[in-house]
Amino acid sequence: MVQYRRSLQPGGCFFFTVVTYNRRPLLTSELARICLRASIDKCRSMLPFTIEAFVLLPDHLHAIWTLPPGDSDYSKRWGLIKAEFTKTYLAQIGLEESLEIELVGDNRRAIWQPRFWEHTIHYEEELENHLNYIHYNPVKHGLVNSPHEWEWSSFHRYLRNEYYEVDWGTNKRKSSDLNFRI
């Protein structure tokens, strides 16, 4: 059996994809957003990290984090966030809806896929490509026609800081103008 290996770069910058179990579209509900924000805040109070970029879609999220110097334990952070989210979310949705969430081993309710995907970002061009990927994702999935139309994205922060133009990534622009690959 192949061993799964994570890239460990202390103080590194990392791109993540985290997906709900069976791609259940629950993350953009008001309750899920509140629980996720609280879970991230709680984790950051114990184990700091900087969120460089973030997009929340119904069934998955993408994020870019930078960890503190000497620290490479993003797995512990994601474990804490997912566990805290699951606990608070299930406590809030009520028994009836909770019963609709599939059971996995040890009678646990499945909210998240067991793992997450991570990629270490090594240089500026790679960071730019991943920022563009994150911010274009709602358009790619057909949720909106332009990144600025998607409420749950760090695109708005980058727009305020004049990193993007308001029409960047719209369906009206040629895809060759977007210039990203990951």
Image (cartoon, helix red, strand yellow):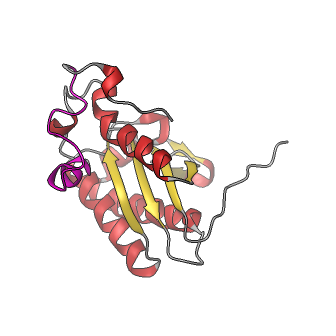
Figure quadrant of residue 44 = bottom left
Specify whether residue 170 is painted magenta: yes
Question: Magenta segment, principal secondary structure?
Answer: loop
Q: Which residues are magenta?
A: 154-171
Figure quadrant of residue 166 = top left
User: Considering only vertical position in the picture, is 87 above or below 4?
Assistant: below
Q: Nearer the viewer, residue 8 or 114?
A: 8
x%, y% of residue 149?
A: 15, 36
Specify whether residue 21 is painted magenta: no
The answer to whether any part of residue 36 appears in the image is yes
Q: Is residue 165 left or right of residue 136?
A: left
Residue at x 22% of width, y 21% of height: 171
x%, y% of residue 59?
A: 38, 38
x%, y% of residue 158?
A: 23, 52
Residue at x 44% of width, y 63% of height: 81
* Position of the N terminus by quadrant: top right
Q: Nearer the viewer, residue 111 or 47?
A: 47
